[in-house]
Image (spheres, rainbow, N blue to C red):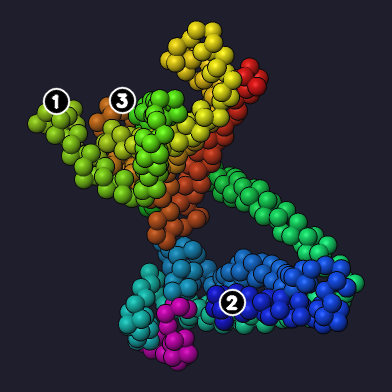
């Protein structure tokens, strides 16, 4: 049964449980609601929650655990001899999943039932034809071992889906039945519902922490695995980025790190002054009518998808810069894709992050500080420079940090506006690339996670994580230092 149907069935059972629980409570009190300990709706929600919560918890755990179990069982059926020379277990398992999804395995098993080489060759050809007609492409030969693994993969998945449906629906029915059995006028339904809601809120609050821990552990373990097969001295000591899945890769991080920092610096040089000046004008100088129009219009920039900014960089900003700084102009720029192209467009994208947050922070500065400054004879510009901005500095630093993190993590604008060249250069009109763009390129396609060329993506991600953590620590230091002065 599809997961969506299963969710809808559980929700339908919860709705039915709500109605039944509410009706049972009212009828148990002789239609006198004053005899109930809690409002009738609490009795209904008690039943609905005891239908949904256990069922959905088991469904989430099942969806996480089933792929691991199915893959482990299918992998155990693939001996070393089933992995062709030059291939890997990960690539063979990718073909196993494709075969399981796109082929009538009972027919295919009949094609490979005979064991002689001639039949195997003809059968393999027939199976490839069947896969081609189903729109499925495989990268290795379809051997009996691959076919057996595909059969195990499909049958185990089907069995798991069936058991999942039975267990989840059964838990929902059992939970609803138990909740209905305890429904009576003296049952403290409100207390039970509030305890359940508190538990749900605690779980939701813990989800962010658990997700962060999971991300960090995933990065740490895969980074450790990468450094087991590729020396850390070459990763941090080499100035050449030249991956090759055939071997002989040079995976030095410095060209990527330099491109990331260079593009982010240009983006911040564009966005921070413009965004901060816009925030000061909107909060201190603009009238209510102009502010009501300008602020929403400025914030519209934050809602534009990054792929649109990438197209803007590729089709508009790049050719415009090339016409000025290219061969027909100053001769500094060789192509439209360059650090300057990506940096300018990324800076435009970051303006609303800086301006909107800074505007809210400046407006939060107490009016008494302004009045005191004016009372001492300061002008508006002096008040802004010497009173308002220092008081709002912690929040402004946070806004700039958010913009910097957004710039470091941007991908599409870099791919379309800066090019893909990993190089160390001071020329802002050269094509470069960033860490995030290379993470995407290294993990695109059937990546073999036993090779350093794929695992390097986790080392790059860990480097970005450490960088952003350092930015957060520095920003926290600045915020605490100045907050003590202006609290």
**336 or 69: nearer the eye?**
336
Q: Is residue 111 magenta?
A: yes
**412 lies left or right of 385:** left
The mark found on residue 102 in the picture is none
Visible residue check, residue 422: no
User: Looking at the image, is 411 positioned above or below residue 28?
Assistant: above
Q: Which residues are magenta?
A: 99-121
Q: Name the residue that disc number 2 marks.
A: 8
Q: Where on the picture, by quarter, is residue 1?
A: bottom right
Q: Name the residue that disc number 3 marks.
A: 426
Badge 2 or badge 3: first in the primary sequence: 2
Q: Residue at x 54, y 72 (%)?
A: 78
Badge 2 or badge 1: first in the primary sequence: 2
User: For mark 1, does the 10 Å Cα neighbourhood hold few (<14), some (14 to 19), or many (20 or more) residues?
Assistant: few
Coordinates of residue 53 in the picture (x, y in percent): 71, 68
Rounded to the nearest angstrom, the CA distance separating label 3 from label 1 is 17 Å
Query: Which label lies toward us, 3 or 1?
Result: 1
**61 or 306: nearer the eye?**
306
Badge 3 vs badge 1, beta-carbon distance below 8 Å? no
Q: Residue at x 86, y 79 (%)?
A: 29
Coordinates of residue 420 in the picture (x, y in percent): 31, 43
User: For mark 3, does the 10 Å Cα neighbourhood hold few (<14), some (14 to 19), or many (20 or more) residues?
Assistant: few
The mark found on residue 330 in the picture is 1
Rounded to the nearest angstrom, the CA distance separating label 2 from label 3 is 57 Å
**113 lies left or right of 43:** left
């Amino acid at each position: 049964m599809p997961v969506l149907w299963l969710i809808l069935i559980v929700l339908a059972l919860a709705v039915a449980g709500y109605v039944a629980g509410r009706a049972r409570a009212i009828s148990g009190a002789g239609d006198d609601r004053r005899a109930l300990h809690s409002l009738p709706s609490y009795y209904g929600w008690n039943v609905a929650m005891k239908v949904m919560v256990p069922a959905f918890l088991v469904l989430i755990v099942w969806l996480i655990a089933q792929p691991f179990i199915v893959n482990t069982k299918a992998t155990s059926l693939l001996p070393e001899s089933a992995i062709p020379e030059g291939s890997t277990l990960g690539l063979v398992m990718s073909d196993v999943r494709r075969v399981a999804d796109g082929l009538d395995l009972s027919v295919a098993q009949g094609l490979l039932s005979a064991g002689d080489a001639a039949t195997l060759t003809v059968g393999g050809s027939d199976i490839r034809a069947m896969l081609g007609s189903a729109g499925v492409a495989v990268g290795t030969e379809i051997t009996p071992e691959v076919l057996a693994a595909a059969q195990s993969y499909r049958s185990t998945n089907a069995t798991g889906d069936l058991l999942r449906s039975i267990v989840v629906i059964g838990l929902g029915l059992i939970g609803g039945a138990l909740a209905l059995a305890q429904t009576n006028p003296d049952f403290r339904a409100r207390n039970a519902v509030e305890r359940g809601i508190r538990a749900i809120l605690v779980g939701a609050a813990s989800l962010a922490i658990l997700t962060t821990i999971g991300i960090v552990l995933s990065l740490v373990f895969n980074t450790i695995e990468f450094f087991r097969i590729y020396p850390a001295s070459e990763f941090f000591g080499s100035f050449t980025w030249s991956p090759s899945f055939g071997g002989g890769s040079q995976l030095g991080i410095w060209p990527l790190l330099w491109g990331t920092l260079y593009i982010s610096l240009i983006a911040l040089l564009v966005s921070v002054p413009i965004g901060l000046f816009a925030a000061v004008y909107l909060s201190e100088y603009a009238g209510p009518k102009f502010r009501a129009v300008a602020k929403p219009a400025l914030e519209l920039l934050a809602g534009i998808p990054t792929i649109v900014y990438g197209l803007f960089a590729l089709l508009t900003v790049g050719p415009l810069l090339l016409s000025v700084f290219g061969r027909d102009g100053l001769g500094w720029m060789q192509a439209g894709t360059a650090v300057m192209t990506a940096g300018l467009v990324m800076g435009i994208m970051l303006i609303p992050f800086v301006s909107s947050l800074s505007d809210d922070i400046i407006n939060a500065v107490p009016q008494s500080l302004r009045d005191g400054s004016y009372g001492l004879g300061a002008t508006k510009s002096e008040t802004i420079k010497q009173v308002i901005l220092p008081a709002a500095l912690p929040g402004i630093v946070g806004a700039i940090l958010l913009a910097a993190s957004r710039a470091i993590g941007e991908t599409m604008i870099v791919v379309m506006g800066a090019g893909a060249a990993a190089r160390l250069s001071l020329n802002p009109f050269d094509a470069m690339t960033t860490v995030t763009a290379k993470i995407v390129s290294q993990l695109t396609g059937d990546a073999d996670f036993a090779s350093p060329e794929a695992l390097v993506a986790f080392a790059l991600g860990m480097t970005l994580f450490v960088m952003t953590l350092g930015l957060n620590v520095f920003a926290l230091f600045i915020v605490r230092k100045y907050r003590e002065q202006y609290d």
